[in-house]
Image (spheres, rainbow, N blue to C red):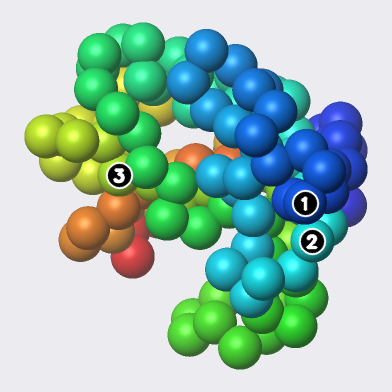
Amino acid sequence: MNGATVKVYSKAKDGSKALSANFKVREFACSDGSDTIFISPALVTVLQQIRDHFKAPVTINSGYRTDYHNDRTKDAAKFSQHKYGTAADITVKGVAPKDVAAYAETILVGMGGIGIYKSFTHIDVRKTKSRWNG
């Protein structure tokens, strides 16, 4: 794992629990329907800062991924940060992925992962710095 603190939730039991002003546990759930969800509080903090900065809704397209789901996701890294609850692929309503990434650079100085893709931005809170274009 990457050293970030991660909490474990149940989608059934904790799904509607608020993690911040604008994010709930269920938004980070794996799309394979599994109940367990790993979520890093540091990731939630970064996503909330992005939401507050742009004053626009942030949609989590992919948050936590089980090993099974990640291994079947096209082009997913074997040791993807999504598997540890420390990453999210997001879209910000009305904001280009490159602009989301540029703002994330001001939050994740010298650390974290920021990936720019055509239709979304990858954000993660790993301890080391990683940047890429999808």
Q: Examine the rendered structure and indicate whether residue 88 appears above or below residue 92.
A: below
Closer to viewer: mark 2 or mark 3: 2
In the picture as drawn, the residue positioned furthest to the left comes out as 94
Q: Secondary structure at mark 3?
A: strand
Q: Residues within 10 Å of mark 2 (few under 14, many from 20)?
A: some
Q: What residue is at 84 percent from the left and 37 percent from the top? A: 6
Residue annotated with mark 1: 12
Local crowd at mark 1 within 10 Å, few (<14), some, or many (≥20)? few
Q: Would you name the residue on which mark 3 appears?
A: 91
Locate residue 117: give its quadrant.
bottom left
x%, y% of residue 51? 37, 20
Which residue does the image show at 56% across and 76% down from the upper left? 76
Q: Amino acid at mark 1?
A: Ala
Q: Quadrant of the C terminus?
A: bottom left
Callout 3 amino acid: Thr
Residue closest to the eye, 47 or 124: 47
Query: Which residue is pictured at 35% across the width and 34% down the height?
Result: 58
Q: Is residue 10 left or right of residue 126?
A: right
Disc 1 and disc 2 in contact, CB within 8 angstroms:
yes
Label annotation for residue 35: 2
**For the residues marked 2 and 3, what is the alpha-carbon distance in whole angstroms?**
24 Å
